[in-house]
Image (spheres, helix red, strand yellow):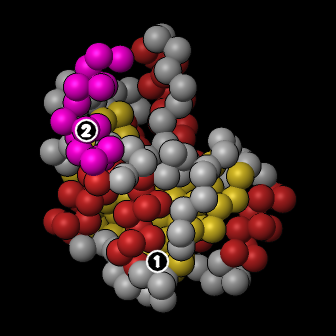
Amino acid sequence: MREHLNDPWVKRAQAEGWRSRAAFKLIQIDDKDKLLRPGMTVVDLGATPGGWSQVAAKRVGAAGRVIALDLLPLEPIRGVTFIQGDFREEALEAELEVALDNRQSDLVLSDMAPNISGVETSDQARSMHLCELAMEFAIKHLKPDGVLLVKVFQGAGSTEFHAAMRAAFRSVVSRKPEASRDRSSEMYLLGKGRKP
């Protein structure tokens, strides 16, 4: 807890009005890769507490749309449509289709992570499962040439997932933003150009 409270990114997030330090991870990746543009449609999987949705809404502007999904509630964010529930369920998917106005998205974001049990092999397996779900969702809901940005914890299954991303997207690169903790095994895979 002390480490979290003393974290310079946490302090900066509080000072600048971001909901989480994670906002800076997306800002840093987007500054480098120019993912978010005015008018885009963005889906943010596992959005709570909303740092990534805040960044996305600001950068796509009033002409864009951001749809945030999470099992947990999300305090309202201007410019963000929130749907609470499991994105694998048919009822929620139907709600998403309405929010998307039966169109596909330009960008799918996933900063999802499982609740940590402390059992490394179990936590890693659950993390990789979330990555796979995010990619399946993206393949289904992205426009041709759409983009997926997904958090991956390096470890068992991450090499195979990277290969699966390369099979699904024309370009796949890894990113480790400055706001990621050095000791964390997290990295982000950026898949551009969803293949047919």
Question: Mark 1: which amino acid?
Answer: Asp
Residue 158 is situated, as x and y percent measured from the top left of the image, at 36, 37
* Up-down relation of residue 133 to residue 33 (above or below): above
Queried whether the magenta region covers residue 128, the answer comes back as no
- The residue wearing badge 2 is 11
- On screen, residue 164 versus residue 86, left or right, reads left
Instruction: Please provide the residue range marked out in magenta.
Output: 1-15
Residue 31 is situated, as x and y percent measured from the top left of the image, at 19, 67
Tell me how far mark 2 sits from mark 1, CA to CA: 32 Å
Queried whether the magenta region covers residue 14, the answer comes back as yes
The residue lying at 28 percent from left, 37 percent from top is: 10
Q: Residue furthest front?
A: 15
Residue 22 visible to an observer of this rendering: yes
User: Which label belongs to residue 106?
Assistant: 1
Give residue 91's quadrant in the image.
bottom right
Question: Mark 2: which amino acid?
Answer: Lys
Q: Residues within 10 Å of mark 1 (few under 14, many from 20)?
A: many
The residue lying at 71 percent from left, 52 percent from top is: 84
Position of the N terminus, as image quadrant, is top left
- On screen, residue 25 versus residue 122, left or right, reads left
Q: Along the line of sight, which residue is nearer the eye, 53 or 131?
A: 53
